[in-house]
Amino acid sequence: MNSSAVQERQSVERKHALTLLREMIRIRRFEEKCAELYSAGKIQGFLHLYIGEEAVAVGSLQALTPEDALVSTYREHGHALVRGLPAGAVMAEMYGKANGCCRGRGGSMHLFDVSRRFYGGNAIVGGGLPLAVGLALADKLQARPRVTACIFGDGAVAEGEFHESLNLAALWKLPVLFVCENNLYAMGTHLARHQAQTDISRKAAAYGLPGEAVDGMDVLAVEAATRGAVEAVRRGDGPYLLEARTYRFRAHSMYDAELYRSKEEVEHWKERDPITNFVARLRAGGLLSDLDLTEVETVVAAEIADAVAFAESGPWEPVEDLLKDVYTLVT
Amino acid sequence: MTQMTYREAVRAGLREALQSDPRVILMGEDVGRYGGGFACSKGLLEEFGPERVRDTPLSESTFVGAGIGAALGGLRPIVEVMTVNFSLLALDQIVNNAATLRHMSGGQMSVPLVVRMATGAGRRVAAQHSNSFEGWYAHIPGIKVLTPATVRDARFMLAAALREPDPVFVFEHTMLYPVPGEVDEQAGPVDINRAAVRRAGKDVSLITYGGSLCKALQAAERLAADGIEAEVVDLRVLRPLDTSTVLELVARTHRAVVIDEGWRTGSFAAEISARIMEGGFYDLDGPVERVCSAEVPIPYAGHLEDAALPQVETIANTVREMFSHHG
């Protein structure tokens, strides 16, 4: 390879690396703002923060095209942002405003954007998996070369729908990428306290689909593994289970006193922070300068400030429209 | 007019749906090779192939959920849950997904899904196979609930259900499958918004649906012999409920008996009774009466099962009592 080709490759790599970094920082800063706004009473109900798990959303979603579908969980702010939902529409939804992505009907746990094929925001653990199977069935029967990615947590692995959905997707050879975000805790119950077999990726074998575990704190590893998995799914090989091993740094929700894990454990995992480690790696490789990082932070801060302003200035859905969209209006 | 059984009518409706729209698929337990738990889909696999007539594993939650996903993906799935008893395993998908997705997404999507299931008691199959939960389902905003009680409705309600943009649940009473009737094949779709008067009568309105309709009609015959002219109203649609028709009819007869195979406590009959009280209280000559199932898990032994369910004679006696007390 000649030197200009090397330079070009480095430039592409640098650009991509900066994108990954920016996306992770977007999620982190967005959620830090959410926590603040929750304390201020602007955001109500449940708020489940993704902080610590950013590498999974950012790495895995790189492998999807806009035509692919994504079905997610109730800890989905990160997935929504990476999928391209405007931060303002997501923030306004958390405010419960009419300019939110679901007009204030869904809130933090139920973000949807059909135009981006983002099908929730599913707050019943395991409930999204059958939807993903059905979306993929529709693609297969209509000969569309799409993939449906379905993200769920380690808690969902205990639900019957996990087992039923892996089986059905494999039986019908459907294009589903199952991504388990294993953050070790089903709310407050450690994986070892609810699973006899704690290696989630191995469960795939029972249903005849490939299963693979990846370091969920390493954005590049997640991206590489997902690209491989999506390629197999898109080729028509049937579904694939990817287990991303990660950790949530914050409490399960805003009401959680975290009695079930030690501070030492949390601190230990924070040493593997996907953002700080990626920053260190990029710096060591000469791909990131202080100026780059400042620029990323500045751009992200501006986006979040705009999102908050958008939410603050948004109107409330009129109470007269309470019953709207329970059924489809047939004209 | 064509003579056919309720089962054949359901099958003809399914065949027509699969023929007329390539987006329609049928899936559920044993709908393919077995021909359906109640033989409603017999022959359809051979006619339409395994892509469109799909046997599923015994995974109610997932194949109902997959039906929701497939509907979001542009298909028009008909999901058969063999019986309402098994639908409890899919309740989460029904209540938390099918019914909510449109509203919760701020109107971004519709779920054009039809779920059919057999319901009701009378086959000596005991408590776990004899539930009548259509009234529960009617509690849920976001879905529609149909209860075809006649062969004609069994033949044509499906086409109407498939035209709905939202999830429709169709409850077919198991005792009706062998019942014969006449169908005008040219008649086309039926109205799935309105209740129907199945027998005219000026003295009392017998309000019912599904498997209890034929019992109410027989009771009306017996009452006619006693000189009481009973009107029989088939609700047909439990959600959205055609309250105005019920109130109009009761305003003319001034008396109402609601017959419902659900248990009395929290029954759909209670809802009907409450609506009459709210909207037609001053039209009544006496309290609304209810004939429901006894508050017991449906027993196996025939004489006990019969005693647990609304029967022709209990319906007739309830009306006779009404007239002896208040007439």
Image (tube, rainbow, N blue to C red):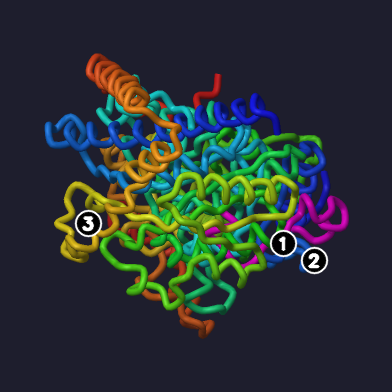
Magenta segment boundaries in residue numbering: B41-64
Q: Amino acid at mark 2?
A: Arg
- Residue that lies at the very extreme toward the right in this rendered image: B47
Residue at x-position 45% and y-position 35%? A20
Q: Amino acid at mark 1?
A: Asp
User: Which residue bears the numbered disc 1?
Assistant: B55
- Residue that lies at the very extreme toward the left in this rendered image: A40
Given residues B181 and A247, the one toward you in this image is A247
Mark sitting earlier along the chain (2/1) = 2
Residue at x-position 48% and y-position 34%? A17
Given residues B292 and A66, the one toward you in this image is A66
Question: Which mark is in front, 3 or 2?
Answer: 3
Neighbor class of circle 2 (other Cα within 10 Å; few <14, some 14-19, many 20+) is some
Name the element at disc 3.
helix
* Label at residue B33: 2
Marks 2 and 1 in Cβ contact (< 8 Å): yes
Using the image, determine if residue B194 lies above or below residue B286: above
Residue at x-position 40% and y-position 40%? A284
Name the element at disc 2.
loop
Q: Give the spatial CA distance, label 3 vs label 2.
A: 57 Å
